Image: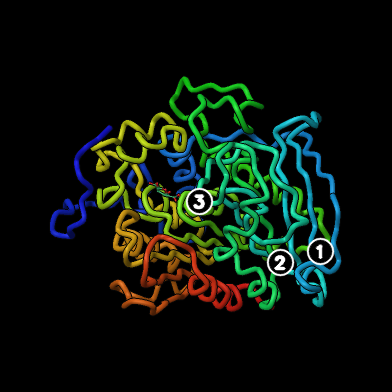
Amino acid sequence: MQTTPPLYHEDLVPDIHLPDPLVREDGTPVTDAKGWMTFRRPELLTLFEHHVYGRSPAPPATLRAEVGPVAEAALNGLATRKEVTIWFGERTDEPKMDLLIYLPRQLQRPVPLFMGLNFRGNHTIQPDPEIPLPTSWVPNDPQWGVDSHSATDAARGSASSRWPVELILDHGYGLATIYCGDIDPDFDDGFQNGVHGLFARDDSHGDAWGTLSAWAWGLSRTMDVLEQDADIDIERVAVIGHSRLGKTALWAGASDPRFALVISNNSGCGGAALSRRRFGETVRRINTTFPHWFCTNFRRYNDREEALPIDQHELISMIAPRPVYIASAAEDLWADPQGEFLSARAADPVYRLLGTKGLPAVSKPTLNTPVWGAIGYHLRSGGHAITPYDWTQYLAFADHHLKR
Ligand code: GTR
């Protein structure tokens, strides 16, 4: 384990030279939307697969979805609650993922949707006793009286501050969520469990999929299922995630253009933050603590971030021209707020080339002052979390970009 203390001083950040998103690997400049979409974006996708997150398998030929109980008057009559169980093939034993959907009850369907993974089970997002407990492995959580790897009623609603469902419904959006551990449990087991276990693993090129790729793949499979759901406007789905799930939301949005809008909340290293800055969490640190998140090749860049053929601003660029929001928190230095802003900023030329307003700010905006064009950014006061303040900004951003 690396023992070097994390770097928290701007003066100590190395001089960095970022790869230019608008120059192809062979040196050819990209000068128009066609050159971006036809050549550079696919090239970047391959580079991120190969060097950072790993390659995911093609969608399975059969995806079985079973709609479970539908409650027409959930949340005191505010919402329709739907459960959908999704299997990744013909077999109906594990793994399966349970999709929980709340839809605004009074509105005409189809509705736009926020979709995001949760950390500890669907039952944690609301104190709604009808939400089924996950049957997959869950992390230990003594704070909520959970001291086993099976979910219990004790944690019901424990993450509700992160999921202001009523506010989301009030704005006319549905919310769909899945427990990330249904797709792949968040620990290093040599890629046996979760969806990894369903596919033959070939890591001879160091680029077999890690857990972040598995989670992003699960989000895309959810889109496959929701394409068949007449209640949801599949062209207006925003993917959102906090922290490790913010990294996942960016990768899902960058690799699957069906996501109309992407939100990264405090995603940090391997998410929105520039790796080359080495501020806070570093590539070595993240590969050591979470050896299952990225692909094997990413470890080549431990302490040599400058050798990466890409940096994270190019992950954001791959979402262009679709709207993307990057949010930092002032006390969350581990996630490098400045590096997240600079990364959003360095994606701006791509957004501009594609005819949008990009990010209309040249330097990091002051505290609690959101700024946005097609790229949004804010620096919230406080620490590593997703709060009602964050959601309020995301809803305003989505209202602007997705409302008809
Ligand atoms: C931390 C990790 C971060 C971030 C965070 C989280 O331990 O170092 O990269 O992902 O966990 O997901 O809460």
Please indicate whether residue 3 sits to the left or right of residue 190 in the image: left
Please indicate whether residue 299 sits to the left or right of residue 327 in the image: left
Q: CA distance from mark 1 to mark 3?
A: 37 Å
Q: Earlier in the sequence, mark 1 or mark 3?
A: 3
Q: CA distance from mark 2 to mark 3?
A: 30 Å
State the residue at coordinates (58%, 24%).
Answer: 192
Identify residue type, mark 3: Gln
Numbered label tally: 3
Please indicate whether residue 179 sits to the left or right of residue 22 in the image: right
* Label 2 with label 3: CB-CB less than 8 Å: no
Residue 356 position in % (x across, y down): 48, 72
Classify mark 2 as within 8 Å of ligand 1 or not, answering yes or no.
no
Q: Earlier in the sequence, mark 2 or mark 3?
A: 3
Identify residue type, mark 2: Gly
Residue 370 position in % (x across, y down): 42, 77
State the residue at coordinates (31%, 54%).
Answer: 334
In the depicted view, which residue is nearer to us: 77 or 294?
Answer: 77
Q: Nearer the viewer, mark 2 or mark 3?
A: 3
State the residue at coordinates (63%, 51%).
Answer: 154
Q: CA distance from mark 2 to mark 1?
A: 9 Å
Q: Nearer the viewer, mark 2 or mark 1?
A: 2
Q: What residue sits right under mark 1 in the picture?
A: 231
Identify residue type, mark 1: Asp
Q: What residue sits right under mark 2 in the picture?
A: 174
Residue 250 position in % (x across, y down): 50, 53
* Label 2 with label 1: CB-CB less than 8 Å: yes
Label 1 environment density (alpha carbons within 10 Å; few <14, some 14–19, many ≥20) = some
Which SS class for mark 1? loop
Instruction: Give the label on residue 143, or none.
Output: 3
The scheme the figure's colours follow is rainbow
Against 91, residue 390 (above or below) is: below
Label 3 environment density (alpha carbons within 10 Å; few <14, some 14–19, many ≥20) = few
